[in-house]
Amino acid sequence: MTLPLFDTHAHLNVDAFSDNVDAVVQRARDRGVTGIMVIGIDVATSKRACELATLYPGFLFAAVGIQPNSVAESEPGDFSVIQELAGLPGVRAIGETGLDCYWDDTPLEMQHEFFDRHLQLCRDTALPMVIHMRESGDLIAEQLRRQTAVPVGVMHSYTGGLELAVQCLEMGLYISFAGMVTFKKSEDLRSVAKAIPEDRLLVETDSPYLSPEPLRGKRPNEPARVEHTLRCIAETRGVTAEYLAAVTTENAKRLFQLP
Ligand code: NI
């Protein structure tokens, strides 16, 4: 029996999927996936996300944005392109945006500036935001607190602690878990996943990266594998996978304002 799943974060717009999207989409459908958010990291991948949303209407949806690590190499006009793309019908989110203190591809000051621009675009379009966080949780929380209004959104591929998760929840955000939560040594992360209120919990693959157990290391990851992450969190929370799949899929539809 398949589970009704929603993969809230997949990069079907990158090279790993340039010639096999049809097969990847079919395998996802076969495993019960009912929708996938395709996430942009720059102008080219945001355009491709929009194209995929047009090719698979009602199944693939697009998020458009410039990921913090891609900001430094973006061209001056790129953000206006993102603003234009945000008006297309298949676009259901802005991002991914946020801050990354692990890689030093983009000076932090520039990351802050672009994070602010994406936040403003969310307010202008009433679209939710997709937040990338890597060793930057406290800075992200601070920047969100400085906003006049925090748009609704999701902390994607969450790897932070419970204290930060609670701060994000208090600001109205959803928390999404990827394959990392299934890894043997991720007990702390599983205890965070256990504590998230069920109406704020989401799952994702972050394809093509980070395959969940028992497929860890098998690349590329793909949306059909989101089931393993869902099952792991369901077991941790002591609920059935069927129940948690239904709940998280409803959450995704609410967040991304899907029919
Ligand atoms: Ni991503």
Image (cartoon, rainbow, N blue to C red):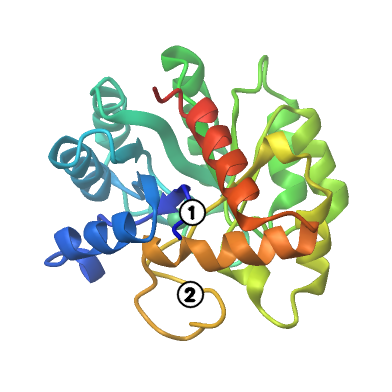
Viewport quadrant of the C terminus:
top left
Picture residue at 27% right of the left edge, 20% below the top: 87
Q: SS for tag 2?
A: loop
**What residue do we see at 41% from left, 16% from top?**
125
Q: Position of residue 176 (x, y in %)?
A: 61, 49
- Residue 35 is drawn in which quadrant? top left
Observer-side mark, 2 or 1, equals 1
Viewer-proximal residue, 232 or 97? 232
Q: Is residue 65 left or right of residue 6?
A: left
Q: Is residue 207 left or right of residue 42?
A: right
Q: Which mark is residue 3?
A: 1
Is 10 situated left or right of 128 in this image? left
SS class, disc 1:
loop
The quarter of the image holding the N terminus is: bottom left
Which mark is on residue 238? Answer: none
Residue 159 drawn at (x, y percent): 69, 61
On screen, residue 208 above or below 249: below
Q: Quadrant of residue 131?
A: top right
Residue 195: percent from left, percent from top: 84, 50
- Residue 211 bears which disc, if any? 2
The crowding category of the residue bearing disc 2, from other C-alpha atoms within 10 Å (few below 14, some 14 to 19, many at least 20), is: many
User: From the viewer's perspective, is residue 109 above or below residue 103?
Assistant: above
Q: Front-most of 16 and 132?
A: 16
The local crowd at label 1, few if under 14, some if 14 to 19, many if 20 or more residues have their Cα within 10 Å, is many
Judge whether 112 appears above or below 208 on screen. Answer: above
| Residue 105 vertical placement versus 80 (above, below) | below
The three-letter amino acid code for the residue at tag 1 is Leu
Question: What type is the residue that disc 2 sits on?
Answer: Ser
Q: Is residue 53 left or right of residue 101?
A: left
